[in-house]
Amino acid sequence: MLKDITLGQYFPGDTLVHRLDPRTKLISVVLDFIALFTANNWLSTAVVALTLILAVALSRIKPRALLKGMKPLMFIVVFTAVLNLFYTEGHVIAQFWIFRITSEGLRRTILMVLRIFLLVSCTFLLTYTTSPLQLTDGLEQLLRPLKKLRFPVHELAMMMSIALRFIPTLIEETDKIMSAQKARGADFETGGLMRRARALLPVLVPLFVSALRRADELATAMECRCYHGGEGRTRMKTLQMHTADHLTLLFWIGVLCCVIVLKRFGL
Amino acid sequence: MPDIRLESLRYVYSRGTPFEKVALNDVTLDIPAGQYVALLGHTGSGKSTLIQQLNGLLTPTAGRVLYDGEDIHRSKEALRDIRFRVGLVFQYPEYQLFEETVYKDIAFGPGNMRLPAAEIEERVRKSAHFAGVDESLFDASPLELSGGQKRRIAIAGVMAMKPDVLVLDEPIAGLDPAGCRSLLENIKRYHRSTGCTIVLVTHEMNVAATEAERLLVMRAGQIALDGTPQEVFSRPEELRSMGLDIPGAAALAQALRQRGVSLPESIYSPKYLAKTLLSRMGGVSC
């Protein structure tokens, strides 16, 4: 149940996509987003889709894993689809009761669903192929210029990596506490909203107590290892861009240009 | 009191993902009512998965769990009922306490059974007594007590449901020696006076040797050895190959045997070893 949440999960591997510098991947995702929002017709969307398919194939991530991650977002997808399908003006191709489907609406719906799907798959591909540690490292490096504006880049990155690090731990802990309370006859599945909310109390109290205890222990452990913030801190693994990274970025810029040109000529 | 029977039980974690793992592989097992069983095994051998099958917290991938001859997963009601009949004390149960007072926390289980208040009170007192929780602590907040006390409260909370089967996962892990001894004594006393089945998961061979009447040793999701302590501990090589040890007394007896002292293979408890050695030395009484 709780363990099936795939959001933000990392699937270790040793493919080209896994080996890329996290900064490259982060920038690629941003470029991909820009390209997707620029693309407004079949051909340009297809170009982005093909690029992503290529990336997924290279990463050897199973398409099923990507689809599984989509599940929680199904509601948004269906909602967007319905809105676009029934509320777009244009040439009517089907009609029943108060609903009208136009050819423009159909086209827009398909493009919109495709766009959401590609957006989400792209972010999933990033988190599936990049360990949380690398990800925050990359983010910290990319945001470094903001330090000049006194923006706490290092602290933010540290908080992020700690949060990411503890998500699985807390999920596991929640699972364990729920099982323990179920073993004492706690019932989380039946009853009205209020009853169910109250039934969660035996889970939430121990969970908070243990989260606070963990935070306290972690702070002590960090201090014992002389952690004193980002000032003067060096790294064991410094991020390094290689040829593959430069090529990937060039490639993405190419894709983006391609999309812009396609849009310009309305193909 | 009813028996438990596991029939070709199989359980797979995270099926269909890259993290798929077979935790139980075709386990068939009978636990007759009233037995004191110790479940042993290396970390990751499937002990915890097995005990969560006993009260239906996990649904088997294949196979059946029979309680009193009936499948525990036959209906929702049956499944809820089994939770009260098979009491499960998890590892480090002290982290599951949540109520404002010790009394309320112990009463959580029986309260879920919708028992009358008087009955609940009686059960709380009795189980607190069995688990070694002093009644003067009833109004204290469980979160402010020591680790050992918290664990006793958590165990009392499960005993208060008066289960026919009490399953304890590593109940003595992390306790000091005195706390260990008294907790084990409490469990034994509870076993004797209620006649319920006990399943004790432990790493401690000495504990298993002295407490249980039957040992189950797991390896890679299967029951590798099953028998009385005497039978199981007479196969030290097999135990060692599974990353387990034999009790201190058995190891000492084995070492003496290798040095030419003739001792029977069946020695595993310190008492018996001492007795045998003393009689060997010419019947000196102690």
Image (cartoon, rainbow, N blue to C red):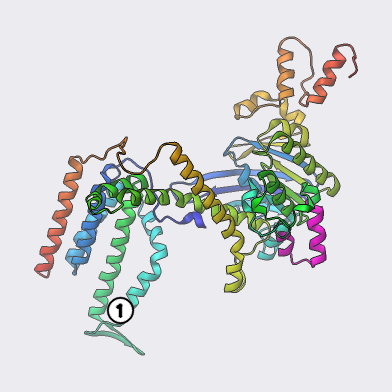
Name which residue lies at 75% across and 29% down.
B231
Is A110 positioned to the left or the right of B285 in the image? left
- How dense is the environment of label 1, judged by Cα within 10 Å: few (below 14), some, or many (20 and up)? many
Q: Amino acid at mark 1?
A: Leu
Measured as percent of width and height from the top left, residue B70 is found at 73, 57
Is A254 positioned to the left or the right of A226 in the image? left
Name which residue lies at 36% across and 51% down.
A62
- Please say whether residue A61 is visible from this viewpoint: no
Q: Bounds of the magenta span? A: B107-128
**Residue underneath mark 1:** A85
Measured as percent of width and height from the top left, residue A162 is found at 41, 48
The part of the image, by quadrant, that contains residue A42 is bottom left
Which residue in the rendered view is the most extreme toward the left? Answer: A265
The part of the image, by quadrant, that contains residue B258 is top right
Q: Nearer the viewer, residue A74 or B30?
A: A74
Which residue in the rendered view is the most extreme toward the top? Answer: B260
Q: Is residue A39 magenta?
A: no
Q: Is residue A226 above or below residue B270?
A: below
Measured as percent of width and height from the top left, residue A145 is found at 22, 50
Q: Is residue B129 above or below residue B243?
A: below
Name which residue lies at 19% across and 48% down.
A248
Q: Is residue B275 above or below residue A230?
A: above
Q: Nearer the viewer, residue A235 or B80?
A: A235
- SS at mark 1 in the image: helix
